[in-house]
Image (spheres, coloured by chain):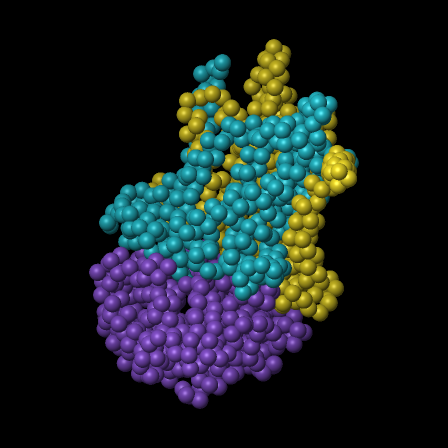
Chain colours: A yellow, B purple, C cyan
Amino acid sequence: MATVAARGRTRRRRRNLLESRRFLATALIAPAVLFILVLVGGPLLLAMYLSLTDAVGGTLGGEWVGFDNFVNAWHDPNFRRALRNTLLFTIVSQAVVLLCAGLIAHALMRPIRGRWLLRFLIILPWAAPVPLSTIGWLWIYDSLFSVVNWTAKQLHLVDQFNPPQWLGDPTLALGAVISVHAWRIIPFAVVIFLAGLASIPSEVEDAAKVDGAVGLKKFWYVTLPLQLPIATVALLFGIVFTATDMTVVYILTQGGPFNSTQMLTSWAFFTGIRGGSLGEGAAVSLYLLPLLVVVAVLMLRFARKVEVT
Amino acid sequence: MADKERVDVSKLDELSRRDLIKRAGAGVILVYGGLGAPGVAYGAPKYRQKELAGTLRILQWSHFVPAYDKWFDNVYTKAWGRANDTEVIVDHINQADLPARVAAEAAAGRGHDMVATLAPLPQYEDRVINHKEIVQAVTRKRGKMKDVAYRSCYNPKTKKYFGFPDSYAPDPVNWRRDYWQEVGFGGGPTSWDVVKRAAPKLRDINHPVGIGMSNEIDSNMALMALMMCFGSFIQSRDHRVKLNTKKTVEVLKFARDLYRDGMSNEIFAWSAASNNQGFLAGRLSLALNAISIPRSAELSNRDLADKTMIAPIPKGPNGRVGLEHVMHTYMVWNFAENKRMAVKFLTDLEVKYIGAFENSRFYNFPAFPKSVPNIPVRLARDSNTPKGKYKVLGTISDKYTKNVGYPGFTNAAIGELFDTFLIPQMFAEVAQGRRTPEDAARDYHRRIATIFAKWRKRGKI
Amino acid sequence: MITSREKLTSYLILGPFALVLAFPFYWMLWTSFKTELDLYDINNVPFFFGHGSPTTKNYSFLFHETEYLTWVKNTAIVGVAVVAITLVLAVPAAYALARLSGRWGQSMGVGIFLTYLVPPTLLFLPLSYVISHFPVGGHAGLQDSLWSLVLVFPSFTVPFSTWLLMGFFKSIPRELEEAARVDGASRLRTLFQIVFPISLPGILTVIIFSFSLVVNDFVYALAFITTSDSKTISTGVFTELIRGDIFYWQALMAATLIPSIPLALLYNMFLDRFIAGFTGGAFR
């Protein structure tokens, strides 16, 4: 009898605990936070430590050298180019993505025949594993067998013997890398934009019609403001996908021609992993972090502000 | 499992099937003989050497000759394992991706017992055993190691063998006999001067010469070899940076002019596969690469293979000084679980290298030349036409093959500038007119000196 | 109703974009049926077949002489497992951050998002240490085991999903939950019976996103897996189809197409729900 009562009490206490907001919140959040702390926090701290040492290939430690690695990296012209490229790739490809995805999403909202097929084709790049689809691009931009160049040659748009080298000229190669980044992220952004458009209540649309807002005017004053929060989401993830990605550059150009398309991530890999200067590689990759944090915080703030108004 | 890995003969075309059967047969015989006492290799496991029993894990590249991997994984290591009561597990990954995995194993202090990479990796010196024992054991049986191999795996500063190269690939010049004849240079690329004079004419008939200036291994190798032919060296014998010299300016000028007069702009866009493809397409009249070019032509385009000749590196003002194309270096981790068998495996492999040499179709040249008897005879025996075209590989490997970083040793600083593609970058910037040769020599001397200083401070040079 | 002019504009915008975005796949399809001789002939018109093309040789090579199907299977297994772990960790955390905690929940949400920004280039080294010293597993912890990927991938899918789901949960009207609680349901019961069903589109979104992030990984799979029967699609394909300086282009293209098309079909089928999912999410 007594034990039953005791059991009832514990159960009640447990229930009370679960009804307590604070306890429940902690219990629900803790597993995720612990997991992230162990798997991201720990290694990140270690990477920070490495960047302050002269660690070499594969040894997770070394002699303390202070900020030497950061200073060394800064004085290396290839590093500066990598830094510049990271910004350039990210900004340009995301601008392209926003523009194209906006247009596509708008057009896809209309109930037209063949919409399903068009959407399938547009979504394809997102379904392909990036390392493999980049190989596809490598073949499309090949120095000799490029289908782009073949077509251009047939149309007599380019020099027959020395066609443009998409991966061999610094400017073109920058364009090539940007194109692949944009290509793979456009479908992602389209989906987010579609979501945004779908969420605009039809009353707003009707009201706009009554007010006589059509075409560009309607887009500018009605659709765009309502879409801003969702556009920010697309942009934020687009930025992160591009800036922290190494695969595209690594497979497409190996940073070439003459290291003119290196990004911070790939340069960190070539210096730290391939070249063996692990400490310096860690320093190079950490330069990325404050940049991203600033961007992310600014955008999250912006998004919240937009939300309020 | 065994079924999946079995060589599926029916899937190969007639030509390579015959070839394969022949080779497989040869391989079996070689291994059989190679392991000494017959019966040991194929009998039931004998537990005479109980203390050696265990597992040996090896990680290496997927060889460009697929048959080599089949032989190594399914024939050689199996037979060796039976003879030594050891289960040998061989894993492969793509050569370009090996460094990432190797770094991951080193960082973890766990992984395979040994890993093999296509270039020595001196930066892991502190994480590997001293391979001196293997070198000595093989030396006792097979005489001295080749200088090019020695200079690739030994650190004179720390007196440590940081790897054991079982083999290397000589780096010949591949040239199209028909094109060269057509422009009146039937003798082929005998000297860099001839190359320079023939190149414009070859380009006029739409068959440019191709020496890569891109972020990839073939460009690195070709350009460093070209430098040495002109007497320009990255480091001196005692590992001081020696790049900023008149010779370097000279070779940069030469390469710039060669590009302007006789190449096309595709060389800046190349990946490691590009010169092979350019050659297989019949576009290029000359390329610097290992024998993967003629070998793949023999499989897919026999006519083209017949017209493809291989030759030693052209002669420059400083003579013929070429590089190895691949220095296949095994590293036994100091955290390996089965160091003892790893050492024995490498010793046995090297002492009887015939199987590897033949099955790699002459790609793997033994680091100890006496490990494969009668190399010239074997080379001459290759059945591909024109008969005897591979004979020259013997000369190339004996006379013109040096290590990366020659006349010094291959060290960690050389490794880093190699992997960050500084040499192709220097050449490309000059060729595209973005820098003067003088400026480039000066600037890259400074950059490379920074790398050397870094590694010197760490006590590795 | 939309006018025919609007229709036309739509086609004019979508047509070219669809062509450009899908072109690489068309080209892969074409290339995958070519013979070696056909592929490497510069005088050929690349849009036509010749020299023995089209051939299915490349596909039979892929299926019979490599372990392609194993790699596809492995990728799928890892994907499903990672999605499961992600949901288990991210859904409760996101709900708690959105509903149960006040201001600090907001900041913590941002904090969790920030971990998503850590560049993976060098993280794989310390992570390699973690997985190979993992207390369970073979001779070297989880090294060379698919479980290593199952363990590591959530490190980027969880932050991503938590953050996304937070938005969804915020968009659910509080009144719904309060009504349930007034009826005497416990918090957990409310969560399972009211909140989760409503946010199903959000959960679906997260599933698809996490899965595609897993498929896209390159560095981790490369560093952690070397045994052929545990490889995922990207590492396996790179090992067997790029040998030294020889690329097996046709087989590479085939290997890319095979998973992409069904995945795209699947994503497209879910897209309607998916859009609904997104609508609730993000910054509401």
Task: Locate the N terminus of chain A by quadrant.
Answer: top right
- Residue B333 vs residue B255, the one in the foreground: B333
- Residue A247 vs residue A75, the one in the foreground: A247
- In the image, residue B297 sits, relative to residue C94, either above or below, namely below
Q: Residue A249: image x %, image y %?
A: 52, 52
Q: Residue A168: image x %, image y %?
A: 47, 53
- Residue C86 vs residue B305, the one in the foreground: C86
- In the image, residue B117 sits, relative to residue C180, either above or below, namely below
User: In the visual, does C115 lie left or right of B281?
Assistant: right
Q: Residue B324: image x %, image y %?
A: 43, 73
Q: Residue C284: image x %, image y %?
A: 67, 29
Q: Residue at x 44, y 89 (%)?
A: B140
Q: Residue at x 69, y 40 (%)?
A: A28
Q: Can residue B150 be seen here?
A: yes
Task: Locate the C terminus of chain A by quadrant.
Answer: top right
Could you say which quadrant of the image residue B258 lies in? bottom left
Q: Can residue A249 be seen here?
A: no
In the image, farthest residue toward the front = A1
Q: Residue at x 61, y 40 (%)?
A: C161
Q: Residue at x 51, y 83 (%)?
A: B133
User: In the visual, does C184 lie left or right of A199?
Assistant: right
- Residue A220 vs residue B135, the one in the foreground: B135
